Image (spheres, rainbow, N blue to C red):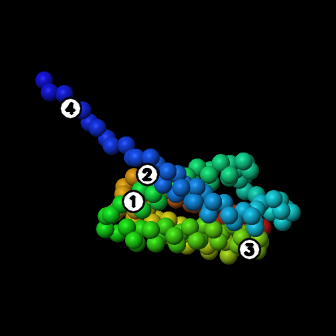
Amino acid sequence: METRTIRQRLPDLGSILTAVGFVLLVNLVGAAPSAIGSPDTPWFRALEKPWFYPPTIAFPVVWTLLFTLLGVALWLVWRSDADGRRLALGLFGAQMLFNVVWTPMFFTLEAPLAALGVIVVLWGLVAGTILAFRRVDRRGAALLVPYLAWITFAAVLNFELWRLNA
């Protein structure tokens, strides 16, 4: 009877530190817009909210978790040498740009309809990023799926905030 041992190589310390760096970078970039816009304004507090609006604490918790997953996904794709890596990284950058633009568009400019346009483009970019990541590293693509689900929910929430307050 033959026993086979499956050994999976663990990343070295340098790789782990690089992954942590990616996670921190994505969290910092993702959190940066909160310095210029947040729901803690008289305008936002006065808006009528839909019945499914989550508790306020849900947003920083969910975004931190999602940005952490994005950082790991980005690291997986960045370290790959597979075909399509440059496209995947470019799409990741584009979707992060739209993610960052949404907050000041909605909260600082108080423009829910324009923010809805931004989030629709963001949704398409995230879907495209998942497809591009899938060609490079399936694990990286899988880590972006919860993000797409949250963006979908956020788009519905954005639409309802606009509709209820237009």
Picture layout, residue 112 above or below residue 146: below
Residue carrying label 3:
111
Badge 2 vs badge 1, beta-carbon distance below 8 Å: yes
State the CA–CA distance, disc 2 to disc 1.
Answer: 9 Å
Mark 3 and mark 4 lie on one chain; the one further toward the N terminus is 4
Callout 3 secondary element: loop
State the CA–CA distance, disc 4 to disc 2.
Answer: 27 Å
Say which residue appears at 53% left-offset and 55% top-offset: 21
Query: In the drawing, what numbered circle is on residue 79?
Result: 1
Residue carrying label 4:
4
Residue carrying label 2:
15
Picture layout, residue 53 above or below residue 85: above
State the CA–CA distance, disc 4 to disc 1.
Answer: 29 Å
Q: Amino acid at mark 2?
A: Ser
Front position among marks 4 and 1: 1
Decide if residue 150 is on the left or right side of residue 143: right
Say which residue appears at 47% left-offset and 70% top-offset: 91
Mark 4 and mark 1 lie on one chain; the one further toward the N terminus is 4
Query: Do we see residue 119 in this rendering?
Result: no
